[in-house]
Image (cartoon, rainbow, N blue to C red):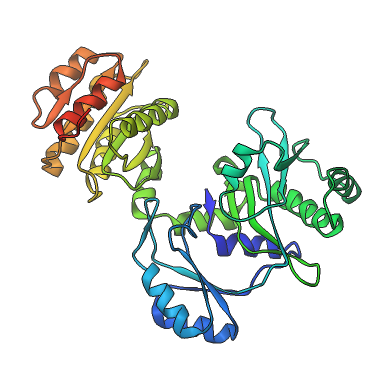
Amino acid sequence: MIVPEHLAKQCLSAYGLRTPAGRLAATAEEVRNAAQQLGCVCVVKALAPIGGRGKAGGVKLCADPDEAVKAASAMFGMTIHGHIVDRVLVEEALPPQKEYYAAVMVNQDTGSVDVLLCLSGGMEIENLAATDSGAVLRLHTAPGRDLPLHEMRAWLTKAGVDQPEPLALCLTILLRASRDLDAMLLEINPLALLADGTPAVLDCKLEVDDSALYRQPALQMVRDTECTPLEQEAKRLGVSFVPLDGEIGVIASGAGLGMATLDMLRCKGLAPANFLDTGGGISVSMLEGAVAMLLRMPSVKGLIINLYGGINRMLDAAQGIAAALEKCGHERPVVTKILGNQQEEAWALLETLPNVHVCKDVQSEKAVARLASILGVAV
């Protein structure tokens, strides 16, 4: 789960790291009150669990409460990479003397926990790392191990980092916090060094391992309260769901197949509205709920259902699809590519349904091309 920024900062402030004073606001009146209480130049930030908010207009520096209200009013209701903004974070503006990018992340390739530092923080950090392999410093550590301050300081000094002492202390704390919080990713961008030499966490992305939430009761409560209705429905169904900002609903059996389907949609000029992975189990109720859930999304103009069944009975999947379409009374095209146990029976059922197009070819690209053709997109 991705922890909302204001709560992630609260977690880090408990470790003694400085974070900006801030207030959460859902209305213009609350924004004004928050800015007045802060009594200083403030930053209004759209609360969305995604990067790129600044480029999308979701971060504004405001000199007074009137400017804060104007900035927040423009943010309320905006969509940033599929996330609708309904709250903003109003924070004191802490002017940085220098900005860094810092992160602690689980390295899926090596099994280590890596500490990352880039001396140039802010936007476009991914592009910088791609063009300059030495721009991001990386330190591999053993999972669950605290790194002594002197080792962190020695690593920074060897890398030629100016003022290694405050950064070493901050990175040591971030590593410990990441372990304590069962974080897959703890990203600070920017990590600011203030005029008095104090590091400050100006932005924070905290992604916690869902399977470890039983050890994090406070964060478990956050997930239950912060989830959107669609995310709550996905949790109930037992599927992995991520909203996106396109118009094609996607259901796939497996994360790899799902990601490949998203890529193929993009290549055909279509934009996915979501990522949805059924995982290893497919049932009538799961497919019925998943299809109905996507059809409730007003942005969805068509669906593609891409299933490799394995030992799962594909007739169950087809029955679930049929039940959802019957209840929803839809008119949007649905392209299905279903292969596996009982696939012929599934095809026979789906071919009786209006607006359902059955693709029997093993190549997913043909199913995507068929949907694009139905929607009038040149392929």
Quarter residue 200 falls in:
bottom right
In this view, 90 is above or below 248: below
- Residue located at (37% from left, 71% from top): 74
- Residue located at (51% from left, 84% from top): 64
37 horizontally vs 75: left or right? right
- Residue located at (58% from left, 80% from top): 41
> In front here: 71 or 119?
119
346 horizontally vs 110: left or right? left
> Where is residue 236 shown, x and y percent of the image?
38, 44
- Residue located at (66% from left, 38% from top): 132
Quarter residue 159 falls in:
top right
In this view, 32 is above or below 352: below
> In front here: 26 or 67?
67
All told, the count of numbered labels is 0
In this view, 82 is above or below 5: above
331 horizontally vs 255: left or right? left
> Where is residue 131 shown, x and y percent of the image?
61, 38
In this view, 325 is above or below 173: above
> In front here: 330 or 101?
101
> Where is residue 264 shown, x and y percent of the image?
34, 28
373 horizontally vs 204: left or right? left
Quadrant location of the C terminus?
Answer: top left
> Where is residue 357 shown, x and y percent of the image?
15, 25
